[in-house]
DNA sequence: CAAAGTCTATTTGTATTACAATACCACATT
DNA sequence: AATGTGGTATTGTAATACAAATAGACTTTG
């Protein structure tokens, strides 16, 4: 039970979620019955049932009377749910998940940047600019603050597409940046070269140049992907086999 | 209470979900208190609470003791959740939602097709081919079966990317095709021209030609988008203002 | 003997009651 | 006027009881 969470139900959701996503219980298999979970976790059936409803809402499990509650095939999980992404990231020893995250970003974000360049309203442009300014301010000294600003920069671009279906991509971006921060284990100065790359994207969007925004975003992501790949290479060399 | 669902909780989730997504309760506002919902819907507090957990898991609401349960800003909703998509589609009078769905597909699917062309394994290729064959078989006579096969075709391509983050896109595809079927109000023969467009995608993927797959998918989607736009134009002309 | 139907036991689904924890609000205190 | 303090409404948790559904064993019947 890692660390205390804001209430019992969330704690149970987290524990079961991690167990399922990390492969502790395989798709098709049943999770323990309710009374058994009550015993194992020392909570009432009320709590267990509410947790089960949460996980079912995320697509992870499905309950039927008598049959029990089974883990659904992973292709129907809500893989862009913030919790599911976090649980997945936890059990990513190899860095394979980080590669998938980055790959997905490469597929979606350039097009999103282009759409933002077409449509972003003035307040949306301001929010993107503010995020970039925060990046510029914190680069080289505060890694945490830079990360937060970086996430905000990309998230605001998703919002600026004026298409709600891009919103969940923000979860991928957040997980990707956090995870890559851990993997590359970077120092404050390492953030500095990233600033002009983001600036290029910012300018293209502000000046309503979709193609330029697309290309700038793509090359920024390719650069990030390259650094991640190198870092993963290094760590797998350090602990071979 | 539209129509009877498999259990009480799901019914409550559906009713509340529709009310929230359709804008009946705005972000920042509180939903009725638990005892009030019990009265309104004629169910126990147990059921209400489990439904609330479901909606919270989808990002729609957030509960706090005393403060009540409030609707969260729509930018943190899990917009790619199957239920959320369905609820959104219900309240799409203008066709604006269908346009967003299509636009998102255009942003993601070409790249996904390219990745599938790079990596798809033989069984995955078989499943894509089978889906296309089913489309070919049912085009011109069975609209329902054609729709199902069409959805399967695109869904299998998402799976063939070998990247789990593409899976939820299948929900968008399903909603888009169903919704566009309703809007364009098409007859069986209207499906026929769609078959060779899909065949082009299929061939490119099977022959492992990423660029070709990308382009074939994109032009297919552009074609679909054009037809949808025409249909929406027509219906808004029919019922002006 | 096989196929169909029935019964039972197990598991989830729903209702009810009670109390704990929390946080907003009004009131009192300094 | 600012601060503290307690009441109160609302969600959080527990416990119990029963309903509904169904897998699997058992029985009946052709």
Image: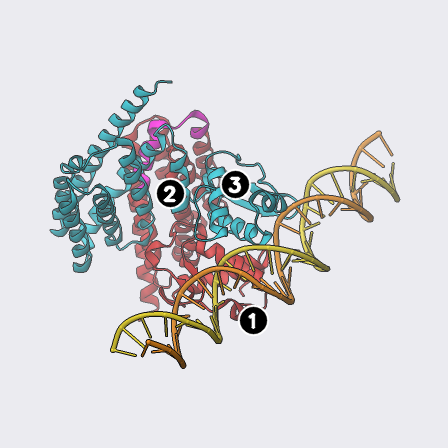
Chain colours: A cyan, B red, C orange, D yellow
Residue B29 or residue B146, whichever sits in front: B29
- Distance of label 2 from label 3 (alpha carbons): 32 Å
Tag 1: Cα neighbours inside 10 Å, few (<14), some, or many (≥20)?
Answer: few
Q: Nearer the viewer, residue A132 or B9?
A: A132
Q: Is residue A200 left or right of residue B135?
A: left
List the residue tagged with mark 3: A72
The residue under label 2 is: B194
Compute the Cα span from label 1 to label 3: 34 Å
Q: Which residues are magenta?
A: B108-125
Instruction: Tell me residue B25's x, y (percent).
Output: 40, 67
**Does residue A224 appear left or right of residue D22 in this picture?**
left
Residue positioned 32% across, 65% down in the render = B236
Pointer 2 chain = B
Q: Can you say which quadrant of the picture contains the C terminus of chain A?
A: top left
Answer yes or no: is residue B158 visible: no
- The chain letter under disc 1 is B
- Per the image, the residue denoted by label 1 is B39
| Pointer 3 local density, CA inside 10 Å: few below 14, some 14–19, many at least 20 | some
Rendered view: B120 above or below A191: above
Q: Which is nearer the N-term, disc 2 or disc 1? A: 1
Determine the secondary structure under disc 1: helix
Estimate how packed mark 2 is, as few (under 14), some (14 to 19) or many (20 or more) residues with alpha carbons within 10 Å. Answer: some
Instruction: Please identify the residue farthest to the top as the structure is shown.
Output: A241
The kind of secondary structure element at disc 3 is loop
Tell whether position B111 is magenta: yes
């Amino acid at each position: 039970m890692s660390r205390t969470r804001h209430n019992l139900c969330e704690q149970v959701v987290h524990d079961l979620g991690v167990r399922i996503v990390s492969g502790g219980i395989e798709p098709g298999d049943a999770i323990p019955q309710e009374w058994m979970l009550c015993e194992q976790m020392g909570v009432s059936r009320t709590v267990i049932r509410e947790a089960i409803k949460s996980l079912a809402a995320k697509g992870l499990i499905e309950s039927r009377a008598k049959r029990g509650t089974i883990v659904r095939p992973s292709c129907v999980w809500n893989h862009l749910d913030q919790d599911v992404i976090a649980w997945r990231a936890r059990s990513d020893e190899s860095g394979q998940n980080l590669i998938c995250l980055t790959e997905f970003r490469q597929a979606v974000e350039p097009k999103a940047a282009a759409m933002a360049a077409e449509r972003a309203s003035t307040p949306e442009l301001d929010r993107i600019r503010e995020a970039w300014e925060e990046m510029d301010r914190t680069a080289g000294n505060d890694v945490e603050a830079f990360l937060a600003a970086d996430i905000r920069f990309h998230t605001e671009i998703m919002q600026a597409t004026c298409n709600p279906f891009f919103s969940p991509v923000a979860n991928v971006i957040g997980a990707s940046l956090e995870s890559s921060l851990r993997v590359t284990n970077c120092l404050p100065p390492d953030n500095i070269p990233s600033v002009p790359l983001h600036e290029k994207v910012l300018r293209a969007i502000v000046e309503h140049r979709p193609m330029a925004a697309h290309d700038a975003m793509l090359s920024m992501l390719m650069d990030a992907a390259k650094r991640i790949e190198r870092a993963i290479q290094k760590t797998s060399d350090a602990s071979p086999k």
